[in-house]
Image (cartoon, helix red, strand yellow):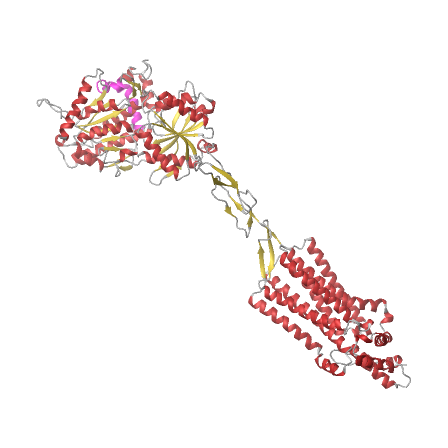
């Protein structure tokens, strides 16, 4: 039934051919095995179905096949077997191609009814056509007899379906790879808003479908997609071109147009779009359909500068040197093709429509052929011929086949498995019967004057690695195109994209990066966060900036001021110490408990000194030492004041029982070590567990990285301060009880003031220290330490130094006794009744005439002893050692 249907189909087509008045042009050469050739030597047909628009480039491609077959025959690699060819014209039309390719099937002898006539050699394979639409129709026809067809340019992915097209092979990759190559070009140039133009056929629609598929994953969008009629005779062609040109002109932010149209369509496109100024200077990305079609541009009206930039995706180039020599030899050897190649002879004689019938020299014609040699066709066609020859060799040379019985189906199956070596590279058909040779990326340019070079290669696309590789790295022609912008929206560095509902993914709003975030690329989806420990950025930044390292520097004016006060305090301590040593035996010094005062001065000197190590760039030892020195030195200061406060209470406590108890508890050089031991314990635990350490404070300021000492264990730091505060409160309570003692020797009043200053300063310090950040946090603590130290220094020593230096008359024992009498007589309410009574009796006995000198001396001792008593020896150096002075004091 299938054979019956096929016979009727062939009879119908033969009838159509019979009634056609046009004589068929062809190129033929005899051989044992014939290779068919189908080339669009004429690119279209007119309304009368006459082939027109002769293409020099397509004629050249047919000659590549001729040259490749002749080379194989001359090489003798097939032994006694020779290859012949039969080339016909498809005229770029499906109907014409079907009618003319029917000759390949007729030559198989199926329609030769005369048994006496010898059958022609079989057509084992057909090379062509270039166009996918024609190839799809022809391969269906050829498949009726399982004749394999090898296309050198049909790239539609639909032809990879071996269920529908089992006899179709090609020496070029399918269009899915070309779509990926175009996407790589767009991505490399950061173009994501482009226009699309294609012919409305299998080739164009499949190419756009694959382009859309790959564009979606790269966030590339199409502003418009325009289809042009497949054939130039279509009545809608002008309207379609007019509508496409309108889209090109109106979409001003679309600077890049990808075109899968045919060369003839692009000729009309350029002629119309370049009439408008806004349609010029675009970037056109040409598919392999027209990337090397020199006749696309009407050079008499327009030039490449009007068009702009043209990128071309071409099939892999071959070596044209051998073929060029073949063309050059045609000048003297063209006669051998007189009766074999009507296409070539008509062209050389000027009988075609390529030059409007004008007759030019053969040399000029040969140069035209050389100039119109497409390098991709050299590789693709030579590879197709080589594959056929290698199949013949595998079947009939290696295995000694019978050519007369060799069937196209057997030949087709062997052809799919063949491996070919060409110019040192090995090729084979993949599972889809394609050869993935790859693509070359070209750019149109002027060689000299108005001569267009359409073979300038700037890169290539590797199919296996899916990678675009630019070979002309030093060429500015390719890289200058990256300055062209073709985007719906652009977010610059320092901004991020914000999607708009209902808009394409390429159209969005831009929002500035917030503080401490940045974006350093165009169209960033998100802003990246800076490392806020060491970096910062302002709103809308495109990079992070290193924070400036800051600390309380030695040159800082606040630091200088604090250091000046620290130095002054240390100097005053030394001066007071010298004054005390010089006036060591005076009542004022002795009433101040001289040794304790010297120890107090030393502790204050240490306190002023420790302030120095609070500033400067923090180091590990410095952070540990500063709090330790401050804690120990100030604890020593408060311990000394505590001893002095205790002594005041002891001196004016007249209750014998209480006085005896206080005397037993009063151990100055035991009290001080015990007080120090408590602080040493706190500090030791602190240093052993979590000692202070340098810390980078990045939260204080965006622009500053503050170096501070981190206390690390705040409970220990608080315990240290609380311990000092506890001692200070005890001093304050004891001193407050003795605030109304004799005026000349009233240390209690000044101790009260100094401890009050200390407590107020540190109570204020706590919240301020927690609130203040940055380098001035250290300055606050330094200031509080200085205030506390100055408070003790002024209250404890300055009044006494004033008496010693400027009120010497008050620094006498007579003044001391007078103060005691006044205290006893006027301030009775400040002591207990028994204490007042004892004090009064003792004071009166000093002046009574009945009191003997020994009695008067004992009374004075009982009153004055606590003030003159040495803390260590518990002796009375004044009243017991200076007997003469006592006698003078007693009336």
Is 330 in the magenta? yes
Residue 438 can be seen in this image: no
Q: Which quadrant of the figure contains the C terminus?
A: bottom right
Residue 468, position in %: x, y? 39, 37
Q: Quick one: 841 or 398, which is closer to the camera?
A: 841
Quadrant in which residue 129 is drawn: top left
Is 498 in the magenta? no
* Main secondary structure of the magenta stretch: helix
Q: Quick one: 516 or 309, which is closer to the camera?
A: 516
Residue 608, position in %: x, y? 70, 63
Quadrant in which residue 751 is drawn: bottom right
Quadrant in which residue 402 is drawn: top left
Residue 99 in the image: above or below residue 648: above
Q: How many marks?
A: 0
Residue 759 can be seen in this image: yes
Residue 674, position in %: x, y? 66, 75
Magenta segment, which residues? Answer: 321-345
Residue 452 in the image: above or below residue 796: above
User: Viewed as shown, does residue 877 lie left or right of 418?
Assistant: right
**What residue occupies the far left of the structure in this picture?**
116
User: Viewed as shown, does residue 760 lie left or right of 237?
Assistant: right
User: Viewed as shown, does residue 298 lie left or right of 785?
Assistant: left
User: Viewed as shown, does residue 845 lie left or right of 457?
Assistant: right
Q: Which quadrant of the figure contains the N terminus?
A: top left
Q: Quick one: 32 or 145, which is closer to the camera?
A: 145
Residue 283, position in %: x, y? 43, 29
């Amino acid at each position: 039934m299938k054979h019956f249907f096929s016979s009727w189909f062939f009879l119908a087509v033969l009838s159509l051919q019979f009634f056609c008045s046009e004589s068929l042009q062809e190129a033929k050469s005899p051989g044992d095995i014939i290779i068919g050739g189908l080339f669009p030597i004429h690119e279209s047909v007119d309304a009368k179905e006459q082939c027109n628009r002769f293409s020099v480039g397509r004629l050249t491609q047919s000659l590549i096949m001729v040259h490749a077959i002749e080379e194989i025959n001359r090489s003798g690699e097939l032994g006694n077997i020779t290859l012949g060819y039969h080339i016909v014209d498809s005229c770029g039309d499906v109907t014409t191609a079907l009618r003319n390719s029917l000759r390949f099937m007729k030559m198989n002898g199926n329609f030769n009814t005369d048994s006496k006539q010898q059958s022609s050699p079989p057509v084992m394979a057909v090379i062509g056509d270039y166009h996918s639409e024609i190839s799809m129709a022809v391969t269906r026809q050829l498949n009726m007899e399982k004749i394999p067809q090898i296309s050198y340019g049909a790239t539609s992915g639909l032809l990879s379906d071996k269920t529908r097209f089992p006899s179709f092979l090609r020496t070029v990759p399918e269009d899915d790879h070309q779509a990926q190559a175009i996407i790589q070009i767009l991505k490399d140039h950061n173009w994501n808003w482009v226009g699309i133009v294609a012919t409305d056929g299998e080739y164009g629609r499949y190419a756009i479908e694959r382009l859309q598929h790959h564009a979606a994953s790269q966030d590339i969008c199409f502003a418009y997609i325009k289809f042009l009629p497949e054939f130039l005779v279509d009545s809608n062609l002008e309207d379609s071109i007019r509508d496409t040109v309108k889209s090109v002109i109106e979409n001003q932010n679309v600077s890049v147009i990808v075109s899968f149209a045919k060369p003839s369509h692009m000729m009309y496109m350029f002629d119309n779009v370049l009439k408008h100024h806004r349609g010029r200077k675009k970037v056109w990305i040409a598919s392999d359909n027209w990337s090397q079609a020199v006749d696309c541009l009407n050079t008499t009206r327009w030039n490449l500068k009007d068009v702009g930039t043209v990128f071309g995706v071409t099939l892999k180039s071959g070596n044209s040197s051998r073929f060029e020599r073949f063309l050059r030899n045609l000048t003297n050897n063209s006669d051998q093709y007189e009766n074999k190649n009507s296409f070539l002879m008509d062209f050389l004689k000027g009988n075609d429509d390529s030059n409007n019938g004008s007759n030019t020299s053969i040399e000029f014609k040969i140069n035209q052929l050389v100039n119109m040699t497409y390098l991709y066709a050299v590789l693709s066609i030579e590879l197709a011929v080589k594959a056929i020859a290698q199949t013949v060799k595998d079947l009939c040379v290696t295995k000694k086949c019978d050519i007369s019985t060799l069937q196209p189906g057997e030949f087709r199956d062997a052809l799919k498995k063949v491996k070919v070596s060409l110019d040192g590279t090995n090729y084979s058909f993949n599972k889809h019967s394609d050869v993935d040779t790859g693509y070359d990326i070209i750019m149109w340019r002027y060689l000299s004057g108005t001569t267009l070079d359409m073979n300038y290669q700037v890169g290539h696309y590797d199919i296996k690695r899916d990678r675009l590789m630019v070979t002309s790295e030093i060429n500015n022609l390719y890289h200058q195109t990256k300055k062209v912008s073709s985007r719906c929206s652009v977010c610059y560095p320092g901004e991020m994209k914000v999607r708009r509902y209902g808009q394409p993914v390429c159209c969005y709003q831009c929002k500035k990066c917030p503080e401490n975030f940045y974006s350093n690329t165009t169209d960033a989806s998100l802003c990246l966060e800076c490392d806020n420990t060491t970096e910062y950025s302002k709103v809308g930044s495109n990079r992070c900036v290193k924070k400036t390292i800051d600390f309380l520097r030695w040159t800082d004016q606040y630091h200088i001021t604090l250091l000046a006060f620290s130095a002054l305090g240390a100097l005053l301590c030394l001066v007071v110490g010298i004054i005390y040593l010089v006036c060591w035996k005076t009542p004022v010094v002795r009433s101040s408990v001289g040794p304790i005062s010297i120890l107090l001065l030393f502790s204050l000197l240490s306190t002023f000194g420790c302030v120095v190590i609070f500033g400067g760039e923090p180091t590990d030892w410095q952070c540990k030492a500063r709090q330790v020195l401050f804690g120990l030195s100030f604890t020593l200061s408060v311990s000394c004041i505590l001893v002095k406060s205790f002594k005041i209470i002891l001196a004016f406590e007249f209750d014998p029982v209480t006085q005896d108890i206080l005397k037993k508890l009063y151990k100055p050089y035991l009290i001080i070590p015990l007080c120090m031991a408590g602080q040493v314990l706190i500090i030791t635990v602190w240093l052993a567990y979590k000692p202070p350490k340098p810390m980078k404070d990045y939260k204080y300021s965006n622009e500053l990285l503050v170096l501070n000492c981190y206390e690390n264990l705040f409970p220990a730091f608080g315990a240290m301060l609380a311990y000092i505060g506890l001692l200070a409160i005890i001093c304050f309570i004891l001193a407050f009880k003795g605030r109304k003692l004799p005026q000349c020797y009233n240390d209690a009043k000044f101790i009260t003031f100094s401890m009050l200053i200390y407590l107020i300063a540190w109570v204020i310090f706590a919240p301020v220290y927690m609130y203040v950040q940055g380098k001035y946090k250290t300055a606050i603590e330094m200031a509080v330490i200085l205030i506390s130290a100055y408070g003790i220094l002024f209250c404890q020593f300055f009044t006494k130094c004033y008496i010693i230096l400027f009120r010497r008359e008050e620094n006498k024992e007579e003044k001391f006794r007078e103060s005691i009498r006044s205290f006893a007589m006027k301030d009775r309410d400040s002591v207990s009744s028994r204490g007042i009574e004892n004090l009064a009796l003792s004071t009166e006995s000093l002046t009574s005439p009945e009191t003997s000198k020994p009695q008067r001396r004992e009374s004075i001792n009982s009153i004055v002893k606590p003030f003159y008593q040495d803390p260590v020896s518990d002796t009375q150096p004044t009243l017991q050692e200076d007997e003469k002075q006592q006698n003078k004091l007693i009336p």
